[in-house]
Amino acid sequence: MPRRFAVLPVLCAVLLAGCGGGGSGSQDAVERVPAKGGLRERVRAAEEPQAAAFPAARGKSLQQVADAAGAQGPELALASSVFTTGRDRVAFGLIDSQGQFFYAPTALYVAPTPQSRAQGPYIAPADVLLTEGRYRSRQAASEQDPFSAVFAAQVPFRKPGKYAVLAVTHEGGEQRASTGQLQVIKPSQDKIPEVGQTAPKITTDTLATAKGNIRSIDTRLPPQPDMHEKSFDQLVGKKPIALIIATPQLCQSRVCGPVVDIATQLKAKYGDRMAFIHQEVYTDNDPNKGLREPLRRLNLQTEPWLFVVDKDGRITARLEGSIGVKAFENAIQTGL
């Protein structure tokens, strides 16, 4: 395998958990990105990649597409890990040689091996992770180098197996290539509840079961008591639900806190139409004690996760890993 297509496990661990007054939605979310150093404008450009700006595959191998792109790009770090055949979401971040998050218009290509025929380009718009200040946790507010946006592409995987992944960025007339690998499984091998299925009636932690000790069931600072009022099984089949599974304080990456912050912001907009439930990950908030029962019931091994369920109890959206404001809000709307 060519060296430029080597796996990047250390970098994946940076982003992947568990390997971890105005509008309250996605509109103008990029305005929350710091302007210093041109960051906001880079994220804005990365929000709207155009397929025509990237090399056409046209029967080329993935390695040939990488060679055509030119310079070696920033490191590719996957921000989701469960992939099945059919169209699936591939979330990722890019990290430059100084260890800073990198943003530019980006597209993905995939192939079973670097020598195989490439599929793509699949545009990967950046999706802002930063909420309005009033919805930001103390953990997020203390970040000196915030993870401002996540890239995500919808990729049609034809067969199960290992895939080489190529991210091509386009900035200032220059293209750069970044590489990684992922594993795709058959839907029958995926034990996590899927879109279209009836959601299992799991019992989630509540203030009542915690005997009022909110910090035992919510590591966010400050915690959100109104996301722990009712258990999932008490509401499923009665009203739409957004179930957020994440541990802001104990996350093994930097994406769990922002996901809960986004849920907090969107609850202000949709909370009268949908219940928002936050479930912590580790028993007694201690990673050494293993996963809490709701995660075991859902067959989850990573976090964060978002499940959106409609009023009939049917799963309408399932997202893993880093989830931006647009993706989160789009998921909510599927359940309303």
Image (tube, rainbow, N blue to C red):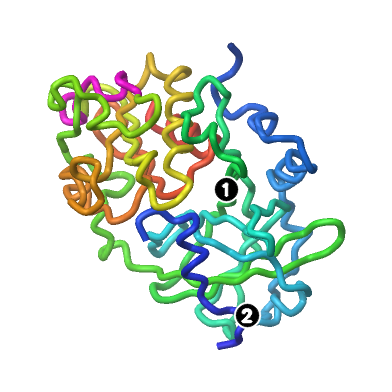
Q: CA distance from mark 1 to mark 2?
A: 23 Å
Residue at position x 42%, y 34% in the image:
260
Residue at position x 34%, y 41% in the image:
247
x, y percent for residue 9: 47, 69
> Which secondary structure lies at badge 1?
strand
Residue receiving disc 1: 150
> Which secondary structure lies at badge 2?
helix
x, y percent for residue 4: 63, 80
- Side of 257 where 108 appears, left or right: right
x, y percent for residue 33: 67, 35
**In the picture, residue 121 is in which quadrant?**
bottom right
Q: Decide which of tag 1 and tag 2 comes sooner along the chain.
A: 2
Taking the magenta stretch, the answer to whether it contains residue 114 is no
Residue most toward the right?
173
What's drawn in magenta, residue-wise? 224-234
Q: Which amino acid does the dot numbered 2 rest on?
A: Arg
Taking the magenta stretch, the answer to whether it contains residue 231 is yes
Residue at position x 25%, y 24% in the image:
214
Picture disc at residue 133: none
Residue 66 in view = yes
Towards the viewer: 114 or 295? 295
Q: Residues within 10 Å of mark 1 (few under 14, many from 20)?
A: many
Towards the viewer: 288 or 74? 288
**In the picture, residue 220 is in which quadrant?**
top left
The quadrant the N terminus occupies is bottom right
**In the picture, residue 213 is in which quadrant?**
top left
